[in-house]
Structure formats: structure tokens, C-alpha cells
Amino acid sequence: MKFEKKFEFFDVTADVGFRAHGKTIDEAFQNAALAMFEVITDTSIIKAAILKEIEVESEDPVALLYDWLSELLFIHDSENMIFSDFEVTITQKTHELYSLKAKAWGETFNFDKHESKDDVKAVTFHLMKVKKNKEYHVQVILDT
């Protein structure tokens, strides 16, 4: 099954849910980040002017997805950054330790240029999934 879309949204009461896809887990995590920022603004007009390097470690892929998106949201909130391009590399260091190293490109949010859609308050663990069939699929619900 080949997916034409990188992600799609689904209905969740009072929150925003999405499923992101990728041929690899790295690509699925990249597309999850893109989906989260699409909730915040129109990612198609974000310039890749600033590079942020991010590293997180977690005990399993679901916790790693949560930590990855939460770290991006922290940078967004603390530095007023928005991103549209991501390069993610995930490795399993031990049975219970996964590592993510990423590069995120974006720019400072500017109300004159960028549309303000929804305010994402937090990433949640509620119904969060990381699955692999022929491709990888992740599911996330954002508190908005």
C-alpha cells in the first residue's frame, strides 16, 4: 500500500489528531513533525532560514515520538520558531534505549507573514501509536 499523502487529520473532540506515514520510521517521524506544524501555520511558506539540531533518547518508539514532538513544540514556544523541513535519524542503542538525532529548518514566526491557525498546547500520549506494516505509520493527538 503506497501513501500519496504524508499525513492526514482525523476528528478528536476538542483536540487535533493526525496520522503520519513514511517508508522508514525516520520519514514517518519527519512527516509527524510537519503535520504538527501544519496545525500551527501554513508550512508551505516557511523558509528554511534557521537550522536547529535536536537530540532525544527514550525507552521505546512511542516515547521517542512523544519526546521528539514535545521538543519541537518547546522550541516553538520558547524561541517563536516554526519549521517545515526535517531530517531525522533514529537508532536503537539497546533493547530499551532509542536515540533520535534530527535537523529542523525553519524561521521565526511572523504575524505579518505567517497565518496563525491553532495554538498547540501539548503533545499527548493519548492513542499515540507507532506501527510498521510495509511502511511506518504514527498516530498523534495534540492538545489545542
Image (cartoon, helix red, strand yellow):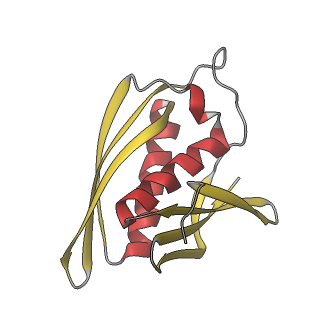
Looking at this view, name the residue that lies furthest to the bottom: 95
Looking at this view, name the residue that lies furthest to the left: 93
Q: Quadrant of residue 93?
A: bottom left
**Where is residue 67 drawn, in percent x and y?**
41, 62
**Where is residue 117 drawn, in percent x and y?**
73, 37
Q: Nearer the viewer, residue 135 or 128?
A: 135
**Where is residue 61 drawn, in percent x and y?**
38, 74
Q: Nearer the viewer, residue 80 or 4?
A: 4
Q: Which of 120 and 104 is in front in this view?
A: 104
Q: Residue at x 45, y 31 (%)?
A: 79
> Could one spot residue 70 in this view of the protein?
no
**Where is residue 123 drawn, in percent x and y?**
57, 60
Q: Which residue is drawn at 47% across and 65% down?
A: 66
Q: Residue at x 58, y 31 (%)?
A: 44
Judge from the rendering whether residue 54 lies leftward or rightward of residue 40; answer left or right: left
Judge from the rendering whether residue 45 lies leftward or rightward of residue 91; answer left or right: right
Q: Quadrant of residue 92?
A: bottom left
Judge from the rendering whether residue 1 lies leftward or rightward of residue 25; answer left or right: right
Vertical order, 75 against 112 (above or below): below
Q: Residue at x 35, y 78 (%)?
A: 60
- How many marks are shown on the rendered structure? 0
Looking at this view, name the residue that lies furthest to the front: 1
> Could one spot residue 141 in this view of the protein?
yes
Looking at this view, name the residue that lies furthest to the right: 13
Vertical order, 20 against 36 (above or below): below
Vertical order, 54 against 85 (above or below): below
